[in-house]
Amino acid sequence: MSIKVDIRNQGDTLHLTLTGKLDEHFDVQQITGASKGSRRVHMHMSAVRSISSLGVRAFETLLRALEKSGLAIELEEISAATANQLSMIPTLLGSAKVLSAKLPFVCAACGSEALGVVPYEAGAAALHPPDCAACGEQMELDGLAEEYLPH
């Protein structure tokens, strides 16, 4: 399944929810067309499960087109797949701001796994870990922080 984009205009803000695989089928024109009359774009990206190399190129094209239109761009709850791409290509964001990331965590005490939302900033996984729903202990990021968060 390629990416599905839910588009809602609310006041001067275009709200986007991206779901699925970000690939060469990502329709940049659909979003840039819907952004007319907006001042801000808010993207919710927790359900982006993977990004192909052509998807990275399409996403960069979208961000540059929105920037060129003078729109403020915010990304919320970026998925681990998105966070991983941003860590490998830091210039991909341009002027877009990432508010938070939804990343994989594991509980050292009981072995439970869960996704947790943390601010998109250096050290956030250690400073803001979720509590385990099963045992109440603090969870640990499942992977290296530099794979997902700025450093």
Image (cartoon, helix red, strand yellow):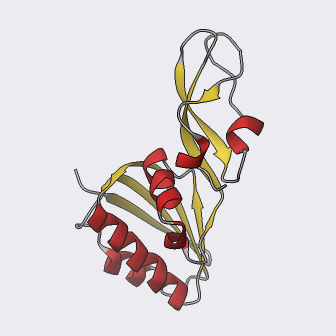
Residue appearing at x 62%, y 41% in the figure? 117
The quadrant in which residue 39 appears is: bottom right
Residue appearing at x 47%, y 77% in the figure? 63
Residue appearing at x 53%, y 35% in the figure? 143
- Please give left or right for residue 104 compared with residue 131 in the image: left
Residue 4 versus residue 149: which sits nearer the camera?
A: 149
* Vertical comparison of 35 with 43: above or below: below
State the image coordinates of residue 131 (x, y, percent, origin top left). Answer: 69, 23
Residue 32 versus residue 115: which sits nearer the camera?
A: 115
* Vertical comparison of 12 with 122: above or below: below
The quadrant in which residue 138 appears is: top right
- Please give left or right for residue 131 compared with residue 78 in the image: right
The quadrant in which residue 6 appears is: bottom left
State the image coordinates of residue 122 (x, y, percent, origin top left). Answer: 71, 51
Question: Can residue 51 be seen?
Answer: yes
State the image coordinates of residue 48 (x, y, percent, origin top left). Answer: 40, 51
